[in-house]
Image (tube, helix red, strand yellow):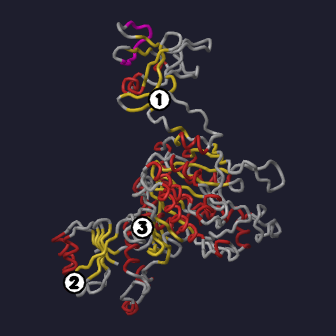
Amino acid sequence: MEKLKMHTPNLADENYKKLAALFPNAVTETLDAEGGVIRAIDADVLRQEISAAVVEGSQERYQFTWPDKKKSVVLANQPIKKTLRLDREKSVGRDGTPGSIDTENIYIEGDNLDALKLLQETYLGKVKMIYIDPPYNTGSDAFVYDDDKKISGREFSERSCQRDEDGNLLFDMRINNESNGRFHTDWLNMLYPRLRLAKTLLSDDGVIFISIDDNEYENLKKICDEVFGAANYLNTFAWVSNITGRQISGRGAAKTWESILAYCKCINDSFSLNVDVSFAKEKMPDTYKGFEKDIRKDDRGAFAVGDTLYNHNRKFNEETRPNLVFSIYYNPVTEEIATGDIGEVRGGWIEIPPHTNGDGSHKYHAWRWSKQKIANESYDLIVLPTNRGGYEIYTRIREFNKTLLKDCITNISNGDSEVQKLFERKKYFDYPKSVDLLYTFASSIKDKDALILDFFSGSATTAHAVMQLNAEDGGHRQFIMVQLPEVCDEKSEAYKAGYRNICEIGEERIRRAGRKIREESPLTTDSLDVGFRVFRVDESNMKDVYYTPDQYQQEQIELFADNIKEDRTPEDLLIQVMLDLGILLSSEIEEAEIAGKRVFSVAGGYLIACFDSEVTEETVTEIAKRHPFYAVFRDSGMASDSVMANFEQIFETYSPKTQRKVL
């Protein structure tokens, strides 16, 4: 039996393994400061392998850096001994209200850095879209993500060269304004490791959208270029959130818009961001106008007559694109379309030559499609007569109800009124994002089964938008919301109404929004997933002796025969095991009793776990007969040495492929 690690993955180890797999000859060993043997990479060998200059030390190079950036990288990579604990009372659906719909949605209370690490094993490469609205670092917002609480003002100033040649402090570290070097550094050190972790969760065709204003736009763009790669930059959206304008500084022009940066995981796997035409025209009329299409039908269904096939740009001609200059031939009887040489005579066919080029030096425009594409996809072309007695060839647009999303988002203000409508016209949250804004981005993702993550969840607008979108287009998108339980001000309306932290507001917003969506469309939302499982980040279920038994004497270890914390339940253990084994947190969990022992079956028997003590051969045998992929027990849970001795043989007999794990 193999012992579970029960902590998040060490991403530095994973990166080392990847590098070692690519260049095994660069892997070596050396001695650390204490004389111990440690792993290492031979820089000389690596330099030879990649045939590129290696910049070292103080050698000048293009880079974006700030104090403690290296610590920020370490922070992202290092594992944590934490877990998630299920809160059934707050959950809605599978674990909350009996008889309600099964849910695949997740809400996590806790620091999002911890949450992102805890999600690594299970959701690596599974998230199609991430949206975040991090602190804008305006100088007035409460900065609650303090990952390094130990650094002093003097230590910081020394690291960041904030002292003059006489050693005098140049800036007052207690003032949170832009003259304070730490003002930007703290924000960068907060966001940078979180973005590194977020990238690993994105699928290869995944997209991340990040809201920001002018205070940190430049810094955000630079760290995104570094984390995601400058080549994977897609757009900067201008969200006109306040057309009347905000004049806060008293200088310059009134500000009417905010930025939303968009990056993809891999540009080669990315796709166009499209939006529904009807939605765009209704919600953003200043940006989306026209779209009056000639709608027709053929044996493949409805289509809209698109643009002409010729390339309107005169630069694409017989000289620059000779392979795209030819004649297209049309048979008016059979409606067949073919290609051929210009001037070729074909009985029964009409020649449609390329358009005449008017640049004065070339004869023809090129076509937009190649001969091969026309041969393969002629069903998406249509030939129509012109007013001058000739013929023109057009494309057939199958998805004519979609249009390319524009990088200017207008007519959508913040979500104040939306949230207040759900909470009896009370203002419980400042500056919530609009459902229409998040709906726009979520609907631009092609996959209707997409997993969508928001790890600065706030009032849970993203969850609301996902449910609304699913209700309207029949999609099955799921969400994961993560929010730090920031305490509500005792003088606030939210606190007076009984909400003690932001998580409570967000969770209640999802409940109310789900009910409202169902009430407004009862006939079409019967199976709509408006539930969510609530988890909170907590310390590991395991005592320290579980992780470092070598630091204890034998007699001390015997005192820790039970290596599980006293206040933890079998269900707590199950959730941490699921995280360790990479099993979805939304998986169905069933309980049964086998030979008097409590047994959990997860995801239809994919994992079967028993954390009871005094487990007999009867229980072990019955579990083995169910052929789980994973079987998990407590190391000290067997009833006797005899059961322990026969454990492996039982599984070898009934389910040899089952992976056996112990705590």
Q: How would you rate the neighbour count of disc 3 (Cα within 10 Å): few for under 14, some for 14-19, many for 20 or more?
A: many
Foreground of the two, 170 or 1: 1
The answer to the question of whether label 2 and label 3 lie on touching residues, with beta carbons closer than 8 A, is no
- Disc nearer the start of the sequence (1/2): 1
SS class, disc 2: loop
Q: Which residue is mark 1?
A: 295
Q: Which residue is mark 2?
A: 616
SS class, disc 3: loop
- Measured in 3D between alpha carbons, the distance from the residue under mark 1 to the one under mark 2, in whole angstroms, is 70 Å
From this view, report whether residue 41 is shown above or below residue 309. Answer: below
Where residue 325 sits in the image (x, y, percent)? 48, 17
Q: Residue at x 55, y 65 (%)?
A: 509
- Measured in 3D between alpha carbons, the distance from the residue under mark 2 to the one under mark 3, in whole angstroms, is 35 Å
Identified by mark 2, the residue type is Thr
Is residue 74 visible to the viewer in this orientation of the structure? no
Where residue 367 sits in the image (x, y, percent)? 49, 21
Foreground of the two, 88 or 232: 88
Q: Which mark is residue 93?
A: 3
Identified by mark 1, the residue type is Ile
Bounds of the magenta segment? 335-345
Identified by mark 3, the residue type is Gly
From this view, report whether residue 252 is shown above or below residue 105. Answer: above
